[in-house]
Amino acid sequence: AILPDKEPIVRVAAALAKYQLTGEPKHVGVLIKALSDESIAVRGSACQTLGLMKAGAKDAVDPVTKLLDHEELRLCAITTLGAIGPAANKAAPQLKKLMDDRDEEIQLRAAYSYWQITGDIKHALPTLVKTLGSERYDRQAIQLLTEMGPAAVDSLETLVVIYRVEEDATFRQLVGVAIKKIDPETAKRLGIR
């Protein structure tokens, strides 16, 4: 009875709740409709909810891809497309272009989402490694490389150099966790536990 509610944000919340209870993305249509709502908050909430549904939101790829042109919702759309994974393959060319965006966070997230969708580490990894040099987004880059695990093995040389010279203990620990996830043997040789 909540899904027909006249308030779009209530419908989005109800679709999320039903998904969390059942694990079935039955209400993707409600969320797709909410992506064209006049409220940015409603569109953003619908986009995030679709991302939580991962491949279950495959029917939303086209409308989410349209959000890549919306400056305020671009980052959410990038993340959601990556979460949908290979089913969002038709968005891959646009994400690849966004790896050259002027905004480093857009570049970083686009590279990671591109990898989630295509599995193409060759094109995604250079952007992620380049972002390791960014004071603003280096921690995000480390987190994403950690999530990539062994697929990010070609970043290992750079991560080891950072690990050896980093003075900030917290940041060094993050780099250590990434190294351990990417290549446990290298981590062991460096004394990372």
Image (tube, rainbow, N blue to C red):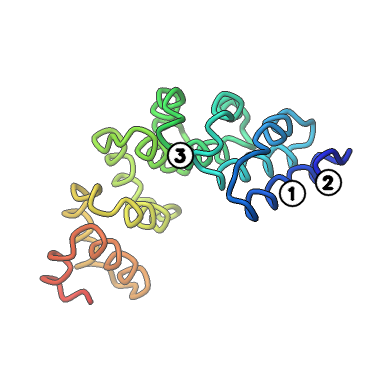
- For the residue pair 89 and 173, the one nearer the viewer reads as 89
Q: Are marks 3 and 1 in contact (CB under 8 Å)?
A: no
Q: Residue at x 89, y 38 (%)?
A: 6
Residue 52 location, x and y as percent? 56, 47
Crowd around label 3: few <14 · some 14–19 · many ≥20 (10 Å): many
Residue flagged by tag 2: what amino acid is it? Ile
Hey, which quadrant is residue 139 in on the image?
bottom left
Q: Are marks 1 and 2 in contact (CB under 8 Å)?
A: yes
Residue flagged by tag 3: what amino acid is it? Gly
Q: Which residue is mark 2?
A: 2
Considering only order in the chain, which callout, 2 or 3, is on the residue closer to the N terminus?
Answer: 2
SS under mark 2: loop
Q: Which residue is mark 3?
A: 82
> Of the numbered discs in the image, which one, if any, rests on residue 13?
1
Considering only order in the chain, which callout, 2 or 1, is on the residue closer to the N terminus?
Answer: 2
Residue 161 location, x and y as percent? 18, 60
Residue 13 location, x and y as percent? 74, 49
